[in-house]
C-alpha cells in the first residue's frame, strides 16, 4: 500500500490530527483508538465526520477487521455516495470499500427532504422535514435554524420520530435551513444554509409585499403636482416660441445692418420703406420675445413651486418632535 498524504488542513476535532499522524507512522491500533475518540467527540461538522469515517475504514482494514472496515465505509458512503478514497490502497482496503459501495447502491443512501410547510393564509404554523431513507438509522435529531419575519436567527431542535421532525413557528414569513444530527450531534447532512436558506411566506404576507412594491413603483399625482407639470409645460412652450421671435428679430436687424452701401456710406441695397419695415419687424419680434421669455420665467418658477409643494408628504412623530417624509421623483 502507498500511504496517501493525509494533510488536508487543520481539523476542528483535536483527536483527528493525532490519528492522522499515527496512521502515517503505521501505528494502526493507536490510530483506531484516536479515531474512536474523534468520532465520539460531540459536534463534529459534516466534513470532519466524513474524514473520520474514511480513516476508520482504512485503519480497520489494515488491522484485518473487515466487518468494522465495511461498516465504516457503508456509513461514509451512505452520507456521501460519490466520496472517493484519496490515494492508492491495497486490496485489503479496497475490497471492503467496494463491498460498501455495492451495498449503498443496492440499499440507498441517507436522504433528508423538506416537507410542505404547515400554514394558513394568515400565518405559518409548522416546519417539517422528512427522512425517507436512513438505512443505518443514523439520524437522531434535526436542528432547525430559523429567522421569522425580521427577527434574528434562532435555533430549535426536534427529534426524528417516524421518519420526520418538525418545529412550531408563528409568523408571516420564515427563512430556514436544517442540519440532521446523529447520536453524537455530528452533522450528517443539511438542507439549505444560512447563505442560501429556504423561504416560506403566507398568502397575506405575499399580498402585502406585492402591494408595497406596487406602491413604491408608483408616485401619487396630487392636484398641485398636476398644476406644476402644466405650468412647467407652459414655461417650456413660451420659452421655445420666444426663442423663435428672438431669432426673427435678429434676422430682420441683420438684414438691415448687412445691406450693401456705396462709397459715401449710403445704403443702396434696401429702399427706405423696406428698411423701415424690417426695423418695425425687428422691434415687434423683440417685444414679443421679451414678453414670452417673461411668461416662461414666471411659469417655470410657479410650476417648480407647485411641483415641490405637491410632493406626497408623511408627517410622523420623532424623538425630537415631528418628522416629514416625502418623495421627489
Image: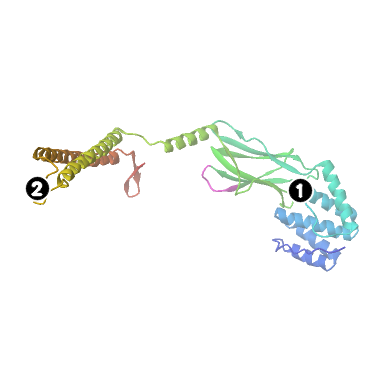
Residue in the picture at 35% in, 49% down: 319
| Magenta segment main secondary structure | loop
Helix, strand or loop at label 1? It is helix
Q: Could you tell me residue 111's position as x and y percent?
A: 74, 42
Q: In the image, is residue 294 part of the stretch drawn in magenta?
A: no
Which of 170/60 is in front? 60
Which of 277/40 is in front? 277
Residue in the picture at 84% in, 48% down: 101
Judge from the rendering whether residue 133 lies leftward or rightward of residue 241; answer left or right.
right
Label 2, residues with CA under 10 Å away: few <14, some 14-19, many ≥20: few
Magenta segment range?
Answer: 149-154
In the rendered image, the vertical position of residue 149 relative to residue 3, given as above or below: above
Label 1, residues with CA under 10 Å away: few <14, some 14-19, many ≥20: many
Q: Is residue 41 visible?
A: yes
- Quarter where residue 142 is shown: top right
Q: Could you tell me residue 226's position as x and y percent?
A: 30, 33
Judge from the rendering whether residue 95 lies leftward or rightward of residue 189; answer left or right.
right
Question: Count of labels shown?
Answer: 2
Residue in the picture at 28% in, 40% down: 309
Residue that mark 1 sits on: 79
Contact (CB < 8 A) between labels 1 and 2? Answer: no
Q: Is residue 39 visible?
A: no
Which of 152/225 is in front? 225
Residue that mark 2 sits on: 266
Of tags 1 and 2, the one toward the viewer is 2
Q: Residue furthest bottom?
A: 25
Q: Could you tell me residue 231's position as x and y percent?
A: 25, 36
Q: Residue furthest top?
A: 121
Q: CA distance from mark 1 to mark 2?
A: 109 Å
Q: Could you tell me residue 196's position as x and y percent?
A: 61, 47
Helix, strand or loop at label 2? It is loop
As drawn, the label of residue 295 is none
Amino acid at each position: 500500500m502507498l500511504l496517501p498524504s493525509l494533510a488536508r488542513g487543520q481539523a476542528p476535532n483535536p483527536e483527528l490530527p493525532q490519528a492522522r499522524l499515527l496512521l502515517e507512522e503505521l501505528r494502526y491500533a493507536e490510530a483506531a483508538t484516536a479515531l474512536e475518540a474523534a468520532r465520539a467527540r460531540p459536534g463534529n461538522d459534516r466534513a470532519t465526520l466524513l474524514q473520520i469515517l474514511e480513516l476508520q475504514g482504512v485503519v480497520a482494514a489494515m488491522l484485518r477487521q473487515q466487518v468494522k472496515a465495511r461498516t465504516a465505509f457503508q456509513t461514509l458512503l451512505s452520507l456521501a455516495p460519490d466520496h472517493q478514497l484519496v490515494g492508492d490502497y491495497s486490496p485489503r482496503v479496497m475490497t471492503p470499500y467496494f463491498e460498501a459501495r455495492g451495498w449503498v447502491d443496492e440499499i440507498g443512501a441517507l436522504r433528508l427532504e423538506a416537507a410542505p410547510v404547515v400554514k394558513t393564509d394568515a400565518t405559518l404554523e409548522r416546519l417539517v422535514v422528512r427522512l425517507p431513507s436512513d438505512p443505518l438509522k443514523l439520524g437522531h435529531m434535526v436542528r432547525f435554524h430559523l429567522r421569522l419575519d425580521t427577527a434574528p436567527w434562532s435555533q430549535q431542535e426536534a427529534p426524528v420520530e417516524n421518519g420526520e421532525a418538525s418545529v412550531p413557528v408563528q409568523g408571516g414569513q420564515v427563512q430556514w435551513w436544517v442540519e440532521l444530527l446523529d447520536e453524537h450531534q455530528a452533522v450528517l447532512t443539511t438542507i439549505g444554509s444560512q447563505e442560501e436558506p429556504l423561504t416560506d411566506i403566507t398568502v397575506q404576507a405575499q399580498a402585502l409585499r406585492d402591494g408595497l412594491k406596487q406602491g413604491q413603483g408608483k408616485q401619487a399625482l396630487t392636484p398641485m403636482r398636476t398644476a406644476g407639470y402644466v405650468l412647467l409645460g407652459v414655461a417650456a412652450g413660451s420659452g421655445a416660441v420666444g426663442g423663435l421671435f428672438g431669432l426673427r428679430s435678429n434676422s430682420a436687424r441683420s438684414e438691415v445692418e448687412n445691406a450693401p452701401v456705396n462709397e459715401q456710406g449710403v445704403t443702396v441695397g434696401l429702399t427706405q420703406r423696406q428698411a423701415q419695415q424690417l426695423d418695425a419687424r425687428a422691434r415687434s419680434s423683440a417685444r414679443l420675445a421679451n414678453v414670452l421669455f417673461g411668461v416662461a420665467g414666471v411659469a417655470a418658477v410657479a410650476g417648480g413651486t407647485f411641483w415641490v409643494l405637491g410632493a406626497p408628504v408623511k408627517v410622523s412623530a420623532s424623538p425630537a418632535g415631528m418628522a416629514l417624509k416625502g418623495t421627489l421623483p
